[in-house]
Image (spheres, coloured by chain):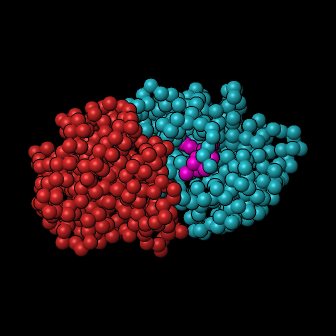
Chain colours: A cyan, B red
Amino acid sequence: MKPETQSAIVREVGLRDGLQSIARVLPTAQKIEWIRDAYAAGQREIEVGSFVPARLLPQLADTDRLVEFAKTLPGLCVSVLVPNLKGAERAIGSGADAMLVPLSASHAHSLANLRKTPDGVVAEIAQIRGLRDAKGSKCLIEVGISTAFGCTLQGKVESAEVLHLLRAVLDAGVDRVGLADTVGYADPAMVRQLFEQALPIAGDRLNCGHFHDTRGLGMANVYAAWEVGITRFDACLAGIGGCPHAPGANGNVSTEDLVYMFASMGVSTGQDFDRLIALRAKVAQWLEGEALHGSLWRAGLPKTMLTATA
Amino acid sequence: MKPETQSAIVREVGLRDGLQSIARVLPTAQKIEWIRDAYAAGQREIEVGSFVPARLLPQLADTDRLVEFAKTLPGLCVSVLVPNLKGAERAIGSGADAMLVPLSASHAHSLANLRKTPDGVVAEIAQIRGLRDAKGSKCLIEVGISTAFGCTLQGKVESAEVLHLLRAVLDAGVDRVGLADTVGYADPAMVRQLFEQALPIAGDRLNCGHFHDTRGLGMANVYAAWEVGITRFDACLAGIGGCPHAPGANGNVSTEDLVYMFASMGVSTGQDFDRLIALRAKVAQWLEGEALHGSLWRAGLPKTMLTATA
């Protein structure tokens, strides 16, 4: 199945997945500038932060303020990560358009990270849905099934387990689901196979691929998912989002490279290269000394695309 | 069409395409050590150098000696690049198993680089075939159609032109043809489309993909070609092969990352990670100060593959 649409959504998650992996705390004013410039570059989905306790992630402690600012930008879908019911309550209160709830398909990782089994997290997701409805909120609930392609703790994660959890969160009434490879274990054949299995179960509700470039396969994995019909992907400007315990390691697929790949393939993302690259330069200055990634910023656009806009 | 075979060939071209882009001259003894270690790591196709005038590429002036050494390793296919009939004569004389003749699909690039039109190069390739037969040599003739996906000089390269040249070199009697993106202009959709058009024309004789990672799409491009049935790829250890005029730019797809991608997909390349990574460390020492690339060396194998060999 080839995608019929020739447009794709690249959601910026640098302010959340990127910055949470970097020890320094970026001032709120710079984050606001980032969001404003990203919006000006054509980004229409931005994950601005996370409603986790500030003592755990001081880098994201200003999420409320960022949602408030981002909501002033017309047509921007403002998303936040929430780890649990308490975070969901804050997200709903903040006025965010969407909340991303991570669900680890790996038992070992789920227990280590959230002190809950995956099924326990599914139960909480059902509560989040109940809360959202009780509050009369329109905040979309999106579940990101992480470690869907393997886990640094337990190793292999069975696709049957991923598909079981997918059915369970759909039954719990979530609006959208994505599959995530936060540890960089996926390869394009795996991606193709798992998305092909998941699509008949979830249909249009399965609409996000989240890939890290840890072992150099991030872009190939995006392409594999795109080929089977996925049209929405997470990415971080400058490819930040590496593991804090592995200095220099590649992070998320880089926004600017992903936007370039799609544009080259004739797929519109609505994003403007020059503005993205200019913003990248700013972020690089703010994050001086941190490992940044991506290729397009150095190589520039091919001659064949120099007058093109995505 | 999915490949039926579950094995792939990764040909090492670091000693040629990689080293020709690096100003320093690696001593012959180190190159021999590289070839020996690469062979011990399971590599069975290595491009050891190029028969071009030494004044143009002093880095590759010892190609004769390298062919001589490489031919002592049983079962190793030793290839060299030759730019013209004179180079072909030297290749045949050296005892190499295969010679790669570059043919640029871009008129502008062909004129600038070889002072010949693409059709002029095709005529010389026919002469090379005549020479090979006259000498009773078994040296395989492989043509690499470069700038097949675009050109830094002329921009767009029409696929009709690439397919015209493909037919022409097949008519000229070459044994193998590959499509090359030496400038990093290709995207996976382009790769898929061009290989799909080329395969019915060339059949099994089209059996090499040569991709650079200039804009981060190298691995995605390999995957796209693999998906339509290509099972043989060029790569450089440590991803060397960047443009000498663009310091730090990504080079060829990196051997170790490519071998990893295939192994993860269940595709055997016969190459051993530990030995590749150990050799990479050696090469990194020899090339200290040069820009190296690739991801696997830093991240290591996923837990799911720690006991696996490719």
Q: Residue at x 85, y 47 (%)?
A: A131
Q: Residue at x 23, y 43 (%)?
A: B122
Percent x, y of residue A196: 64, 56
Residue B208 pos. (x, y %):
36, 54
Q: Position of residue A73 (x, y in %)?
A: 67, 26
A168 left or right of B171 in image: right
Most extreme residue toward the front is: B171
Residue B150 picture quarter: top left
**Is residue A233 visible to us here?**
yes
The stretch of residues the image draws in magenta is A224-239
| Residue A14 x %, y % | 57, 42
Q: Is residue A9 above or below residue B192?
A: above
Residue A285 appears anywhere in the view:
no
Q: Is residue A86 magenta?
A: no
Of the pair A258 and A196, the residue shown nearer to us: A196
Q: How many marks?
A: 0
Residue drawn at (60%, 36%) of the image: A7
